[in-house]
Image (tube, rainbow, N blue to C red):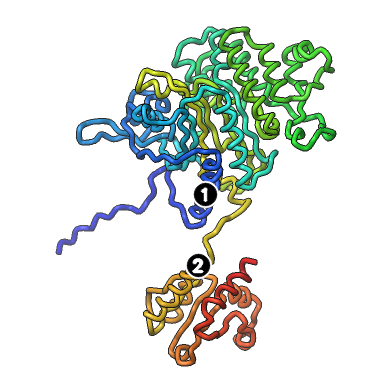
Amino acid sequence: MSGDKVSRPRARLPRGFRDRGAAEIVAERACLDTIRKVYESYGFEPLETPAFEYTDALGKFLPDLDRPNEGVFSLQDDDSQWMSLRYDLTAPLARYVAENFQNLPKPFRRYQVGPVWRNEKPGPGRYREFTQFDADTVGSNSPSADAELLMMTCDVLEKLGLAPGEYVIKFNTREILDGLLNELGLTELSKRITVLRALDKYDRLGERGVKALLGKGRTDESGDHTTGAGLAEEQIDQIMMLFEVGQQPSDLSFDELPDWEKQDSAYSYSSFDQKLGGFVNEVYSSRQPGALPISNKNTIALLRSWLPKTETINRACQQLEQISDIVRARHFGSKRIRFDPSIIRGLEYYTGPVFEAQLTFPVTNDAGETVVFGSVAGGGRYDDLVARFTGQQVPATGISIGVSRLLSALRSRSKPALAPLVVVLSLDDPQSSFRMAAELRAAGIRAETYVGTKKFGDQLKYADKRGASVAVIEGGDEREKGQVTLKDLALGAEMSKSIENRADWIKGRAAQVSVARGALVETVRAMLHVKGS
């Protein structure tokens, strides 16, 4: 035998990825079940597409550069074709629709859930693999399709336990920004994409960071420099004005209004009015300066009056007004669904209305810091995506819930757990142990038979470490009496904290009972019911 040192791989996670334990998986399962039920109640049906797509099918919407693996994870198959892990669920949907267009109902409504991958720089709470849950309507250019997605997302978040005011779904349209950029003379595609991605970082970088990205560029805390769009100060100021409309503090009360109408947040345009030199008061001459309540309808009217009078902007405002009218008629006021012209969305393929669901309550992050969590869902209209394959424009709109991110914010609210576990110890008759576990499972109780060592102490330690609620013990003495012993592990642990000596422990054996073998299921069920009550 050679004395050469054996080379072993080092156990380590790839950067930007993570392992997940039972608690998170169970919470995610409960979350996905809730979302699925809401989506299906609206008539959406499931679809699955593969993790890999040909790189040219995904397009260049996320990657900025020519390298196929920039922004996405890519490989070449055995016939030298580049394939990439999907970076979202929308581009694969466009490929599916293009392949099956003639056989699909119009509009086509589907939902899909699954992991997506992005070859981006990881950071706190930003992973390279995460779960998304999408719903899309393909084949309708009606603003009703966009409005429906907004209302459905409200229903999802409220079914997950959030109340109006703890979240807000903001909507806008890309055509507002497109029209403004045209008027500012910004027609170069690469520069427009840089502007889009800079504005989409507003919630993370704030006004100063976004202005830097619109100008000469920004250097982050690690020293990495991002080249800016190189806009002039006047151009930056005009673009940033869009953010003023949706960022005003609340200073009015609507206590006299009906309950559903109170969902319309009572705001003032005072800051916006001051920047525009009394513009608000000119548009609404009957109002006192700073006393105009923000509603979706009022904000759109203000924007229409301030922006250049072009065909693109006029069409965009009409779409926004239709969406606003639909959701308001269904009593989804602006406390839940709010027009906000600062919502941009960073992906290039959006062509019209865009949306973003944001949480508004404080959340404690992994570092124990209290933060406002921000966006947990987003989407919009992408009328040109299918046309990449067919040359024929197919209108489409969709929304994607970032499940991994949403769960991070909700985990302090509720913690769905696996059903209580019963461990049947296996002492001297494995067949009997397996029979008892099978009886418990047949009664709907989660149960397993211990399959490790025969040592009694090891088996109890295992049940404790597994977090079992009850241990079932049947040794020779119990079997001879036709009995089983049931140990309430959770109660025993609590009692042991306050018991000084073994004599006291023996006197307080309520955490362990012996019952007739035939009463096993009934007694275990009663013990578990008490725990869950």
Badge 1: residue crowd in 10 Å (few <14, some 14–19, many ≥20): few
**516 w.r.t. 131: above or below:** below
Q: Is residue 344 above or below residue 221?
A: above
Question: In whole angstroms, how far apart are the C-alphas of marks 2 and 1?
Answer: 20 Å
Residue at screen point 81% across, 22% down: 291
In screen coordinates, is 142 left or right of 117? right
Nearer-the-camera pick, 25 or 37: 37
Question: Do the CB atoms of the residues marked 2 and 1 lie less than 8 Å apart?
Answer: no
* Image quarter hosting the C terminus: bottom right
* Residue under pointer 2: 444
Q: Nearer the viewer, residue 194 or 268?
A: 268
Q: Secondary structure at mark 1?
A: helix
**Mark 1 sits on what residue?**
33
| Residue 198 shows in this picture | yes
Mark 2 belongs to which amino acid? Gly
Q: Is residue 130 visible?
A: no
